[in-house]
Amino acid sequence: MDNKVHLITEQDIHAYIDGELSGERKAAVEVFLAERDLPLERAARYLRNNFDLKAVRDEVYRDEKLKSEIDRLLARRKPRRHLIGASA
């Protein structure tokens, strides 16, 4: 295997879980998971949660009125400042 950095995408992990990868790409995903101490079962749960959240977002955003209200509220949101030792 060469020394190039290979970006591992969500699709790579899906393909790995589905047994659709072989060779270098499969090995790269295995290294990616091992370097993060991320067991395949947990990676699969993360992917499933991510997929479910995207599906809910897509369903909500089909309602244009609701989408514009969410966008308006997000635009008004103030950035949070995280200060060490600061009390709430």
Image (cartoon, rainbow, N blue to C red):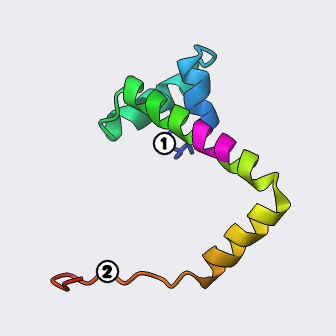
Q: Is residue 14 above or below residue 63?
A: above
| Residue that appears at 59% across and 16% down | 18
Disc sitting over residue 71 in the figure: none
Q: Nearer the viewer, residue 80 or 19?
A: 80
Local SS, label 2: loop
Q: Position of residue 36 (x, y in %)?
A: 34, 41
In reply to whether residue 23 is colored magenta, the answer given is no
Residue that mark 2 sits on: 82
Residue reaching furthest top? 19
Judge the density around disc 2: few (<14), some (14-19), many (≥20) Cα neighbours within 10 Å. few
User: In the shown orientation, is residue 48 left or right of residue 68?
Assistant: left
- Image: magenta residue range: 51-56
Q: Is residue 6 above or below residue 14?
A: below
Q: Position of residue 69 (x, y in %)?
A: 72, 71
Q: Position of residue 54 (x, y in %)?
A: 65, 45
User: In the shown orientation, is residue 38 left or right of residue 74?
Assistant: left
- Is tag 2's residue or tag 1's residue first in the polypeptide sequence? 1
| Residue that appears at 74% across and 47% down | 58
Local SS, label 1: loop
The quadrant of the image that shows the C terminus is bottom left
Name which quarter of the figure residue 41 lies in.
top left
User: In the shown orientation, is residue 42 left or right of residue 46?
Assistant: left
Number of numbered discs visible in the structure rendering: 2
Name which quarter of the figure residue 10 lies in.
top right
Disc sitting over residue 3 in the figure: 1
Is residue 78 visible in the rendered image? The answer is: yes
Q: CA distance from mark 2 to mark 1?
A: 38 Å
| Residue that appears at 53% across and 23% down | 26
Determine the main secondary structure of the stretch shown in magenta. helix
Q: Is residue 21 above or below residue 29?
A: above
Q: Nearer the viewer, residue 15 or 1?
A: 15
In reply to whether residue 54 is colored magenta, the answer given is yes
